[in-house]
Amino acid sequence: MAKKQSWREYLDSVDEKIHKITPEWEHKYGKGKILIPAPKDIEKVIRQVKRGKVITIEMIRDYLAKKKNVKLTASTPTSIYLKKIALASEEEQLQNKKQITPYWRVLKLNGLINEKLPGGLYRQEKLLKNEGHNIELYGKRKKAPRVAEYEKYLSKLK
């Protein structure tokens, strides 16, 4: 029986792809190219974020689009790879590795916590609180947790 591939092995096997925006999508995005990012590039961005700082997934997408000189970065693959990066980080933490990617510092739009990451809302909330962030409820019915005043803690990407 073959050994199960680790999340790190999976992430290392995925390369970026750049596609031309098709005519059907030009009305929404305009002419140009779209990036399907490599997980390693997403990780490089996340690793820039220091303790006590945060970024949004939109910031990652914008940064990679500018860096790769394309119109935009695809949102769905970026979100999927973020989750897999988080799973690799959790796996590596169990292996007592010292350098893990701080995926919990990546928020959704409006500073919302991402329920799709390992451990759900509770885990990301706990990790963010450990770094000094306060969590508040946000939205129409004040149901969604987010980092309070997250704009003050946004990291500058280089």
Image (spheres, helix red, strand yellow):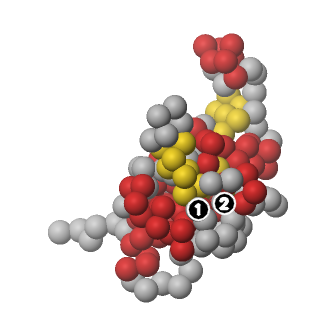
Gap between marks 1 and 2 measured at Cα: 12 Å
**Residue density around tag 2, few if under 14, some if 14–19, many if 20 or more, within 10 Å:** many
Residue displayed at 42% across by 50% down:
115
x and y percentages locating residue 42 in the rendered image: 62, 56
Q: Quadrant of residue 70?
A: top right
Closest to the observer, 73 or 151: 151
Classify 110 as above or below 127: above
Classify 82 as above or below 141: below
Q: Quadrant of residue 25?
A: top right
Asked whether residue 44 is in view, the answer is no
Residue type at tag 1: Asn
**Farthest-out residue, left:** 1
Closest to the observer, 48 or 29: 48
Mark found first going from the N terminus, 1 or 2:
2
The quadrant of the rendering that contains the C terminus is: bottom right
Closest to the observer, 129 or 85: 129
Which mark, residue 67?
none
Asked if the residues shown at circle 1 and circle 2 are in contact, with their CB atoms under 8 angstroms apart, the answer is no
From the viewer's perspective, tell me whether residue 116 is left or right of residue 72: left
Residue displayed at 69% across by 65% down:
53
Closest to the observer, 100 or 20: 100
Residue type at tag 2: Val
Residue on which disc 1 sits: 134
x and y percentages locating residue 141 in the rendered image: 47, 34
Which mark, residue 54?
2
The quadrant of the rendering that contains the N terminus is: bottom left
Residue displayed at 61% across by 71% down:
132
x and y percentages locating residue 102 in the rendered image: 57, 68
Instruction: Describe the element under mark 2 as helix, strand or loop.
Output: loop
